[in-house]
Image (cartoon, grey):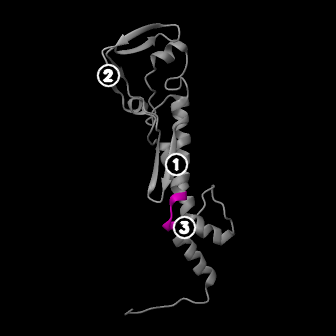
Amino acid sequence: MTGLRQEITGKEETLAILGQAADHYGHPRPLFDAIGGALVVSTQQRFEEEKEPGGDRWPASYRAMADGGKTLTDSGRLVRSITHNATDDGVEVGTDVIYAAIQQLGGIVRAKTKKGLRFRVGGRNGSWVTKQSVFIPARPFLGLDAEDEKDIRAISEQWIAKPWASAIDGDNDLGGVSP
């Protein structure tokens, strides 16, 4: 190596903290896992409130209007399927339920056969109808709202501060986020 080189000795505790910080910051999966967990809870809360991330209410479904239930929560399958996947590169929040996309984005569902789509209108005691296509309005449940952004900032600040806070006060737990 050319140029100036300074070797630091006698500061083992400081060097250990720097080593912990380098390892901590080089492997942010725990940060993304904490963020993902918070976003799952937030997304599930949207089902309870029947609101999109922007705060607007979802258009009520015919089933919910007829039965007095909640839109997108007839069986609860969709809300229970919300999960996250964290890596060192980021976090994904979503679902593997096949009908989630049409609910999130809205669109037209077309029958695959001439028999058409058959479903009840007017709740469990309503009449059966057959259609060749049905329009589903968008009912976004995935996305970030202002509260999510605050939570992400708070979780990130705790995670960034963790190696230094642990060294200063000996506390090894900041909000459940661990290195």
Residue at position x 49%, y 15% in the image: 65
Eyeballing the image, is 65 above or below 53?
A: above
Q: Distance between the residues labelled 1 and 3?
A: 18 Å
Q: Kindly report the distance in space between the C-alpha atoms of the residues bearing marks 3 and 2.
A: 52 Å
Disc 3 secondary structure class: helix
Badge 2: residue crowd in 10 Å (few <14, some 14–19, many ≥20): few
Camera-side mark, 1 or 2: 2
The answer to whether residue 18 is left or right of residue 89 is right
Which stretch appears magenta? 25-30
Q: Quadrant of the C terminus?
A: bottom right
Can you say whether 166 is above or below 152 in the image? below
Find numbered disc 1 in the image and state the secondary structure of the residue it sits on: helix
- The image position of residue 121, as x and y in percent, is 44, 11
Q: Write down the quadrant of residue 139 in the picture.
A: top left
Foreground label between 3 and 2? 2
**Which residue corresponds to mark 2?**
112
Residue tagged 3: 24
Q: Residue 36 carries which label?
A: 1
175 left or right of 132 in image? right
Badge 1 vs badge 2, beta-carbon distance below 8 Å: no
Say whether residue 3 is magenta: no
Crowd class of label 1 (few under 14; some 14 to 19; many from 20; radius 10 Å) = many
